Amino acid sequence: MSTNETDIEELVAKKYKHGFITDIESETFEPGLDEDVIRRLSKLKGEPQFMLDWRLKSFAIWQKMRQPNWAKLNIEPIDYQSISYYSAPKSPDDAPKSLDEVDPKLLETYEKLGIPLHERAKLAGVAVDAVFDSVSVATTFKGKLNDAGVIFCSFSDAVKEHPELIEKYLGTVVPPRDNYFAALNSAVFSDGSFVYIPKGVRCPMELSTYFRINAANTGQFERTLIIAAEGSHVSYLEGCTAPQRDENQLHAAVVELITEQDAVIKYSTVQNWYPGDEEGKGGIYNFVTKRGDCRGARSKISWTQVEAGSAVTWKYPSCVLRGEGSVGEFYSVAVTNNYQQADTGTKMIHIGANTRSTIIAKGISAGKAQNAYRGLVKIFPTAKNARNYTQCDSLLMGDQCGAHTFPYMEVKEPSAIVEHEATTSKIAEDQLFYCRQRGLSEEDAVNMIVNGFCKDVFRELPMEFAVEAQALMNVSLEGAVG
Amino acid sequence: MLLEVKDLHASIGGKEILKGLSLTIKAGEVHAIMGPNGSGKSTLAQVLAGREGYEITAGSVSYNGVDLLDLEPEKRAQAGLFLGFQYPVEIPGVNNVYLLKAALNARQKAAGQPEIDAVSFMRLVKEKAALMEMDQSFLSRSVNEGFSGGEKKRNEIFQMAVLEPTLAILDETDSGLDIDALKVVANGVNLQRRDDRSVLLITHYQRLLDYIEPDYVHVLANGKIIHSGDKSLALQLEAEGYDALMAKAAG
Ligand SMILES: Nc1ncnc2c1ncn2[C@@H]1O[C@H](COP(=O)(O)OP(=O)(O)O)[C@@H](O)[C@H]1O
Ligand SMILES: [Mg+2]
């Protein structure tokens, strides 16, 4: 970049002569991306120098990269200069004051999904003060976590309060140059979560509940970093079954997980971003890089995802199985309806000896949707006796949708055992008739069969979410048959 | 009159299978329909239960005074019509008891009754499973998945016992059963005989009728009932074979 630094500062000063520090609440950047924007962003967030340097380095990398071209995805060109890279949280003045002011349609959906009452207000964006219940719940949680020595905070707070941990671990699993969207995220990430579980600690609660109540407005470039020190254990849930709308069409998140020796991270995702309308207009482009690094021996990383939303989903939660005897798991349900497109799967990279991985992927397509599983199992020569089991099942509803499976395998070690099974089935007319003959409506019959199909994945979800995930399937496939 | 089938004509894929079938069943009666393979027995069962894909070209079916052919399959089920399938389908991942509970509650709801609570339901289910000499482990397995042929049939009668239908159509419930399993299944059906429950037994062999005594026996051939009588007709069939009877009917 040739722009002179003093010019930038002048420009910034002019544009923000009223001072953006005192005015943070209502600040939103003009669309556009250059070094200046990144400097302002970093300053606004009060970041230390190393963080700014890292962002700038990532930006330079991103500028030299090109957006990937996908065979199976059909995507409108994205204009990166038309995006605003910082928007402050919405003012509580604009928020509904109580559930009475919320769109009844949305409330109906919460009802169908079985979202607990005390969370509905928060999800619907009711002004925080009005959400008495959830605030008190959150405070209780915070105390419990503190007592256990668990660090769990927003990424922005972690940068300020635990800079040494951020500097040590950030980008060590997903380096900025990993891919186009990871580079972009590294340059402009807005916020996200940070978790550190100290040695030997079993996190005293699912981080899901707390997270759901507090994670409003994480923005379109989310960054998450979870470190599980030796012998520790944590279960984390991201997202929410409730439909989430966002004006930002592009979402590019990065999630990095690190497990030291004997540590376990269970990471569950329920993704239900706005998928676009029935004609395929609108909807979120969701390009996510998620990777876990099993650094320590016998450590384990388990990804469970339920992907129901977004117009386009592109994500491959992966495990790098470095530690001897480490274990990677990937359980996925991806549902696509109408014009949705999903290209998702996983990479299991076996480096250490006796490493094991399991992949269970279930794709459900309805309407005119396309659903692809793309997976890589790579066994390095060092991975003696590595094992992988992969099972990909596709369920088609109607004859205008598609399911595609791309299993890649690179096995460089003869003692490894790699198994792959794949099935594609149509929701069978005789199954539907059987259920209806027993008295179930056609819709209930479809739901029951689909949920049965997803069972192996749902049972990996934390209990309360398994129930919601089932309901989510039903809502996502409403009107898909008949 | 519980069921009144009049001059029913049904075809599938342009091919006529039922060619003017008439049949009347009163409350509490057990009727057996016998016939050679391909004569249209299963077609009759499926048409009565409301399976899509059949074209009804003539005739009528009235059930408890309503036009059965007008109802969706689930409405027929909710009105007490039960079909024990010749080939019960497997539904992976769907718990046997879960389906049954949904089925029972759908009927409760249709009848304007409250849903059955979990405790009473489990009590009911365990009692009926014992009746069918079914192992408890069956209850939590996926619907028919990995069941042997005999286990599938037993499961059908178990479902019938829980759902307590008004009209049970049992399509070749005896086929594929060894003699011990046949006795259990027949006993299960016999224990469910009531004044207000009718049964239409569809079978290829007379054997089943040694264990479940029907009030009437009908012979179905080529899409029509060609002969009706009491249970002695089954024995006559066994002795003379279908061909003789069909020749008589033709001649
Ligand atoms: N889906 C179908 N399409 C065309 N013909 C069919 C179909 N199903 C059954 N049939 C034919 O209908 C006739 C009666 O079949 P079915 O009712 O199953 O006989 P049964 O149960 O008495 O053995 C047979 O000739 C069979 O081949
Ligand atoms: Mg048959």
Image (spheres, coloured by chain):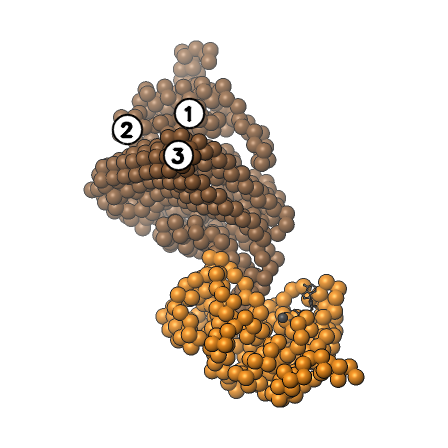
Residue denoted by label 3 = A350
Q: Specify the quadrant of the image occupied by residue A415.
A: top left
As drawn, which residue projects farthest toward the right? Answer: B251
**Image coordinates for residue A86, horizontal then vertical, percent:** 43, 29
**Is A1 situated above or below B191?**
above
Chain at numbered mark 3: A
Residue denoted by label 1 = A176
Answer with mark 2 or mark 3, whichever residue precedes in sequence: 2
Residue visible at 36% across and 70% down? B119
Chain at numbered mark 2: A
Chain at numbered mark 1: A
- Estimate the spatial distance between the alpha carbons at disc 1 and disc 3, rounded to whole Å: 22 Å
- Estimate the spatial distance between the alpha carbons at disc 2 and disc 3, rounded to whole Å: 27 Å
Residue visible at 57% across and 85% down? B214
At label 1, the amino acid type is Pro
Relative to B34, A96 lies left or right:
left
| Chain identifier of the orange chain | B
**Image coordinates for residue B60, horizontal then vertical, percent:** 70, 76
| Chain identifier of the brown chain | A
Say if residue B43 shows up in the picture: yes
Answer with mark 1 or mark 2, whichever residue precedes in sequence: 2
Residue denoted by label 2 = A165
